[in-house]
Image (spheres, grey):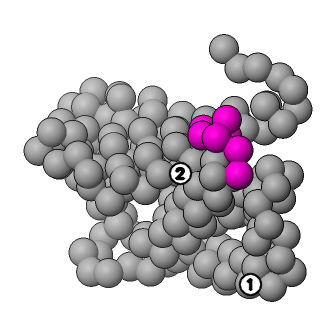
């Protein structure tokens, strides 16, 4: 749904601002969904345990990860619901909504950082244990690199590269889970 909103934003906004409130309301769930991103850390720990990554089974790692995820999800959810203020933006020919403030925002940086760094560490550890598990390392690493701006914004806007990274991250987790279940994708 979010991709369709981005794709059709140019046509919806061509009428002026009368549809802008509707588009903003339809876009708001995107911010809420991003609040849940750190929950992928718990999925990653489960995958890491089943792939034989020793430190993923450490009770302290599990506990600290669960507490950190709970705190980050709670703060991000508050920020992305009750305190959410967005503004329309054009970036690289793509219309989307972004946070209204320009300063550092914990809920934009920390959830993505926590999730991608932990999943990259788990993926690399799993791939070092078993090189056939390269996908679980490649997806989070690609997401981290794309979110960090490895592709210049003059080539592709951050909204596209960030979303591409997220797709690669999720695809790598799905492919790894399918492999653990003995299923082949593609």
Q: Which mark is residue 140?
A: 2
Please provide percent x and percent y for residue 49.
Answer: 83, 59
Q: Secondary structure at mark 1?
A: helix
State the separation of the CA atoms marked 1 and 2: 20 Å
Picture quadrant of residue 149: bottom left
Mark 1 surroundings: few (<14), some (14-19) or many (≥20) residues within 10 A: few
| Image quadrant where one finds the C terminus | top right
* Left or right side of 151 for 115: right
- Residue drawn at x 54%, y 34% is 1
Relative to 139, residue 104 above or below: below
Q: Earlier in the sequence, mark 1 or mark 2?
A: 1
Q: Residue at x 28, y 27 (%)?
A: 11
For mark 1, what is the residue?
64
Task: Please give left or right for residue 58 compared with residue 155 in the image.
Answer: right
Q: Residue furthest top?
A: 186
Placement of 148 over or under 172, stated as above or below = below
Q: Position of residue 97 (x, y in %)?
A: 34, 53
The magenta stretch spans which residues? Answer: 129-135
Total tally of numbered discs in the picture? 2
Q: The residue tagged with tag 2: helix, strand or loop?
A: helix
Dominant secondary-structure state across the stretch colored magenta: helix
């Amino acid at each position: 749904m979010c991709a369709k909103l981005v794709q059709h934003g140019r046509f919806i906004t061509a009428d002026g601002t009368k549809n802008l409130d509707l588009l903003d309301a339809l876009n708001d769930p995107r911010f809420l969904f991003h609040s849940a991103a750190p929950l992928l850390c718990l999925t990653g720990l489960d995958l890491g345990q089943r792939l034989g990554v020793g430190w993923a089974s450490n009770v302290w790692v599990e506990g600290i990860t669960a507490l950190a995820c709970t705190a980050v999800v709670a703060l991000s959810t508050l920020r992305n619901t009750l305190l959410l203020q967005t503004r329309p933006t054009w970036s690289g020919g793509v219309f989307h909504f972004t946070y209204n403030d320009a300063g550092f925002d914990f809920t934009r940086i920390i959830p993505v950082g926590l999730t991608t760094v932990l999943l990259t560490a788990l993926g690399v550890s799993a791939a070092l244990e078993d090189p056939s598990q390269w996908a679980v390392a490649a997806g989070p690493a690609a997401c981290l690199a794309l979110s960090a701006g490895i592709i210049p914004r003059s080539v592709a806007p951050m909204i596209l590269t960030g979303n591409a990274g997220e797709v690669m991250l999720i695809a790598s987790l799905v492919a790894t889970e399918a492999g653990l279940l003995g299923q082949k994708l593609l």
